[in-house]
Amino acid sequence: MTNDAPPENKYPGYPKVFDRCPCCGSTERLMRSIAQEEASKGRVKEGFQTGLHVFQTAVRDPRVVKLAGSPVPAATVIVDVCTKCGTLFAVMIDRGEITLQADVRQAPQSPLYHRSGN
């Protein structure tokens, strides 16, 4: 059996959900309506929440070294667009922590590598 409930947020008052357009008061949103249509077709789970765009950023001081696997504070904002008046607005804001992933990059090859015929 799986538990689909979101984990308890240790930040009181979060997440904050905004159900109505701040300009016209409508509850009709573009991505919400698409998600509802997809749920009725069985393509996503009932109650699936999404937005037009999801922003997530970690709060990191570049002067402080953090190792991969370390938790850092983070913020998430989901925005959607009102289908009545076209206003783009935040439908959910949340704060929490994310775990830093290892930054694996391949070192650039020397230009001399290509000149040597390799």
Image (tube, rainbow, N blue to C red):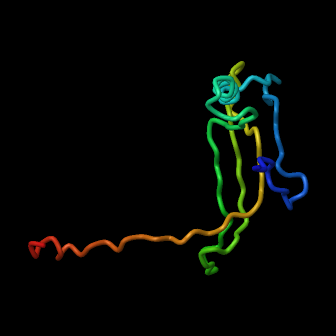
Residue 78 point in image, percent of width and height = 69, 43
Residue 39 point in image, percent of width and height = 68, 28
User: For the point 81% across and 55% down, which residue is it?
Assistant: 7
View extreme (right): residue: 12
Give the vertical position of 85 relative to 100 (above or below).
above
Give the vertical position of 70 relative to 81 (above or below).
below
Q: Quadrant of the C terminus?
A: bottom left
Q: Is residue 14 left or right of residue 67?
A: right
User: For the point 20% across and 73% down, which residue is it?
Assistant: 111
View extreme (front): residue: 1
Residue 46 point in image, percent of width and height = 73, 32
Q: Is residue 79 left or right of residue 18?
A: left
- Foreground residue among 59 and 23: 59
User: For the point 66% across and 62% down, which residue is it?
Assistant: 58
- Quadrant hosting residue 12: bottom right
View extreme (left): residue: 117
- Foreground residue among 30 and 82: 30
User: For the point 71% across and 20% down, which residue is it?
Assistant: 85
Give the vertical position of 113 relative to 85 (above or below).
below
